[in-house]
Every structure is written in C-alpha cells, then in structure tokens.
Image (tube, rainbow, N blue to C red):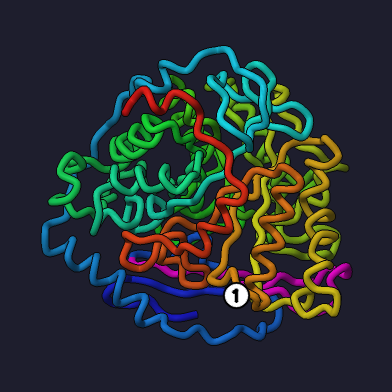
Amino acid sequence: MRAADVIGDAAWRRREPRVQNPLMATGSLALKFRWQSTGMHSADQRAIQGVVNKQKHWRGLKRRHTIVAAGALVAGALGIGASVLASASPSPSPLAASLSSAASPGSAAGPASTETAVPLHTDRGNIVDAAGKPVTLTGVNWFGFETATFAPDGLYTRNYKSMIDQIVASGFNTIRLPYSNALFRAGNTPNINYEVNPDLKGLNGLALMDKIIDAATARGLMVILDQHRPDQYAQSDLPDTSTLSEQQWINDWVMLAQHYRNNPLVIGADLHNEPHGEATWGTGNPQTDWRLMAEKAGDAVLQANPNWLIFVEGIDNYQGQSYWWGGDLAAAKRYPVQLSVPNHLVYEAHDYGPGVSYQSWFQAKNFPDNLQGIWERNWAYLKDQGIAPVLLGEFGGQSVGNDTEGKWQTTLVAFIKQHGISYTYWSWNPDSGDTGGILNYDWQTVNNAKLDLLRTYQAPLLPGTDRLK
C-alpha cells in the first residue's frame, strides 16, 4: 500500500482472495486497485487477504498523478466551495416525460426502434421494456462522486454537459454513476472548475447529482446509481461499517428511489459495489449473507419506487472457490435473490484482466479459449439459462492489442455480445491507474482503439433524443 499523497490525497491498495478456483488452477488471486486524485478509489481499494501476490510494478504513476493533480490544483486556484443544500425531487426531463408506453419490435442491440416503453423490468434472462421488448444496456462508468472529489471526475477541467454529449456521441446508452454515502452528509465540497461549469456553483451533494443526472437523461442516457463505498475514503466488504449502518444504507437508498421516481431514465440501484471478504452467499447469517442484505434493501427500494431495477453483485469466494470481487455469482442458482416485486432483479458481475493482476488462467495453454468456461461458471450461466439478466458492471484494461490483456478484453467483448449481456465499461475516466479509460489523459480526446472495440457491441439510446436537438 502506498501512503496518502500530499497533493492528491491518493492511496493505492491491492487485494487477494483466500483460495483459488480449482477450475483455474492454483495460485493467489490479487485483484485490481485504482488510483485517483482525491481519495482512494473504492474499486481501487482492495483489502489484502492471504499471501502477498506477485503484483506487477506500475510505471508512470507519478506522471498520471501529475496530470490529474494539476487539474485539481487549477480548480483549487479558481476557488472551490459550496454549501450543503437540500434538493427537492426533480421534475421529469423533457425526454423522460415524452417517452411513450408503446415499443416497436426489434433487437435492442440493432437499429433504434421508434419508441421504447419505460419503465423497464425483467423477463427470464432479459431486461425488457413495458411492452416486453429486449433492452440492452451498453454504457460506461463515470466515477468521482464516491471520492473526496464529490463530483464526477474531470469537472475541474471540463464542462459537464460537454462530457455527457461526448458519451452520447461515443455511442453509449447508459451511465453507471458511483457515489459514496458521504455525498449526502455535511462537508462534501466538490472539486469543480466553476469558470467552465458556472451553473454548478453553489451546488453539492444531491443537488449536484440532480444536475448531472438531469443532463444525462435529457440526452436519452439511462442512469444506474451505484453505492460504491460508505464514505469518500475506502470501499467496504459489506454495507454495514463503522461509518455507515445497514439501516442508514437502506434509508439512503429509499431516499434516492423516492427522489428520482419521476425520472424513468434513472433505471435502478446497484445496491453495493463488490461485496467481498466477510461477505457470504446463502449461509443464512444475517451479519454476512450478502444475498439476505440485498433482499432486505431491494424490497425497501421497490416499496419506494416499484419501477426500479435492483442490481445485485456477486461476492469473491464461494465454497473455497475465489474470483474477482463482485464477480462470483456461482451460488445464485442454488440461493437466488428473491424480491417482493418480481421481475426486477438483475445480477451483476465484475471481471478484469492481467493488467490488473496476472492470474493463472491468463497463462493457460488454451488461453483465451479457456475464458468462456470461467465466465459461464461464475456469472454468464444466469443469462444463458434464463434465470435472470446479467450486467457486466465493470471490466476494462489498458490494451486491446495482441498482448494477453488485449486478447482477454477482445474475447470478453465478443463473448458478452454473443450472449446478449449488458455492460458498463470501466471507465469513462482516464484516471483509473490500472485500466485507463475511454478518455485520454487530456480529458478531451478518446482512446480510439478501445472505442472501436466497444462500438462492435453497442445498443441505441432510448428514442426521442432527436426531439431535444
């Protein structure tokens, strides 16, 4: 672990599960960490479990830190500060209000239909609209709200509407928006350049989130809210921590479900990011069984907003077989999540490549042909067997070339396309130290190689966007 940096208050952590999945041979499984300018990134922070993993040395970290820290320092020089504001439930955006209740036939990943009915629900292995037509989510993660930035990253150098316009122009239809519960408490001063974002001045917390979400949904983007960490400092095994009780975690979700009830393009709740460590599945222990916690929170959310989808991630270890944090859903068939409102459950997995940690299956003689069996066992079977839809909520890497990481990433995109699995790519941001992002470090231009790969599997925006232009 690297100590917090003075300039950016950044830190690095890595993690390792306890036991390797026999399907993938033996060896420790150290999982990804990420870095960003203010506060450890929640998905970056990994509790060390077991022996020290062979972690590759990361090069260029100071260079990356300098780029992001420079943006933060510029923003600081321009003046940062906002008071805590209450935010009333926002009115529906013009596009959200205009969406019809009728949908026309067609593949979700094919040409856009003339109309798509909202709200969404599920039907066996598919996410569907109100008319039962399949809808595929193909989006990106835009992180920052969950850190001490208290805003989506990049707003210290760029206008938020311009950023969202570029997400749309890049062909994505969904944003997964991570947050921490500290965002809704006092003292959350956002890091924003108000010269380029003048209409955000004086906003923070939920009011600032409203502006970002309103701009996104007005352009036809769907939004998934992701409880990524309990506070701005670190990720947690389970929602109940020293700074956040399980009941407060549920209360915050109920508040958000009620708050965004009038915006049908805010489509659901990713209840807790990457359960791991002490998290179990199907044990019946109310202190550790993540499935039971997800049912309790999911039912409360659906009581407040019965139109939302409930995204439930996997864990990292089941019956001695370990995988990426949030990526092991092997127990979900035997011990399914059962919600009080049927047809609103979406399972979610996270999956990463050798650029995060070089694991034994990346060195197998039959790589990358061995990957399909690994993905099937851990999460894809839920979609393929019609049990429930699956969202691949995080995956990403620096390379899409002919090296091992590139082969892993291109094979994965082809796999989820073949199986019709929704995704949100990690990440839109460039400042994810082990994966990079769609944007380059100038926060303006895109990584064309990554975008070209993802464009082979993109679904359309919900229709009606053109009426706003």
Looking at the image, which is closer to me, 16 or 217? 217
- Residue 153 in view here: yes
Question: Is residue 188 toward the left or the right of residue 397 in the image?
Answer: left
Q: Quadrant of residue 382?
A: top right
The quadrant in which the C terminus is found is top left
Query: Residue 191, how many percent across, how many down?
Result: 25, 56
Instruction: Classify mark 1: residues with Cα within 10 Å, few (<14), some (14-19) or many (20+).
Output: many
Indicate yes or no whether the magenta region holds residue 192.
no
Task: Give x and y (percent) for residue 186.
Answer: 28, 45
| Residue at 88% over, 70% down | 22
Query: What residue does disc 1 label?
Result: 355
Question: Which residues are the magenta region?
Answer: 15-37
Amino acid at circle 1: Gly
Residue 141 vs 2, above or below: the answer is above
Residue 322 at x, y percent in the picture: 77, 65
Q: Residue at x 70, y 48 (%)?
A: 417
Residue 297: horizontal and vertical position, in percent? Answer: 61, 34
Residue 315's image quarter? bottom right
Instruction: Tell which of 276 and 260 is nearer to you.
Output: 260
